[in-house]
Image: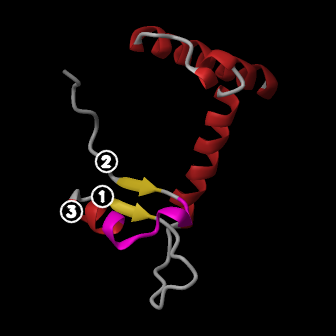
Amino acid sequence: MLEPGPKQEALIAGRGYDSDAIREDMIAREAKPVIPMRRNRKAQDAVDSAIYALRNLIERCFNKLKNSRRLATRYDETTESYLGLVLIASARLWCRHFVNTT
């Protein structure tokens, strides 16, 4: 059985996920939807730009992780081995970042 994770505080998504159903679901879960409104909506709500900027960092991290071919194609059959590979690839990215900043 999966253990519950930390409480979700926000959903950061692109314009393609702007729907009333998603927004209502996030509000019911007591999470803040950080989704820019589509241009054709009559009422435009402001988006927290500091939180929304994190979306770009997360997408860049996933793109760098996908450079590892085994991660992108999911050759591993078990969850444990796939998670292990994700951790190894993440450590490689962290080491590269650490070496390049010093």
Q: Residue 8 carries which label?
A: 2
Kindly identify the amino acid type of the residue bearing the numbered disc 1: Ala
Give the residues in magenta.
Answer: 14-22
Q: Distance between the residues labelled 3 and 1?
A: 8 Å
Q: Up-down: is 69 above or below 61?
A: above
Q: Residue 28 carries which label?
A: 3
Secondary structure found at label 2: loop
Camera-side mark, 3 or 1: 3
Kindly identify the amino acid type of the residue bearing the numbered disc 2: Gln
Whether residue 98 sits left or right of residue 31 in the image: it is right
Magenta: main secondary structure: helix
Q: Do the residues labelled 1 and 2 touch (CB within 8 Å)?
A: yes
Whether residue 22 sits left or right of residue 95 in the image: it is left
Tell me if residue 21 is in the magenta stretch. yes
Which residue shows up at 68% across the image and 22% down it?
93
Q: In which quarter of the image is residue 101?
A: top right
Tell me if residue 52 is in the magenta stretch. no
Q: Which of marks 2 and 3 is nearer the N terminus?
A: 2
Q: Quadrant of the C terminus?
A: top right
Kindly identify the amino acid type of the residue bearing the numbered disc 3: Ala
Which residue shows up at 51% across the image and 75% down it?
37
Q: Which colour scheme is used?
A: secondary structure
Which residue shows up at 50% across the image and 71% down it?
47
Q: Distance between the residues labelled 2 and 3?
A: 12 Å
Crowd tier of the residue under label 3, counting other residues whose Cα lies within 10 Å: few below 14, some 14–19, many 20 or above: few
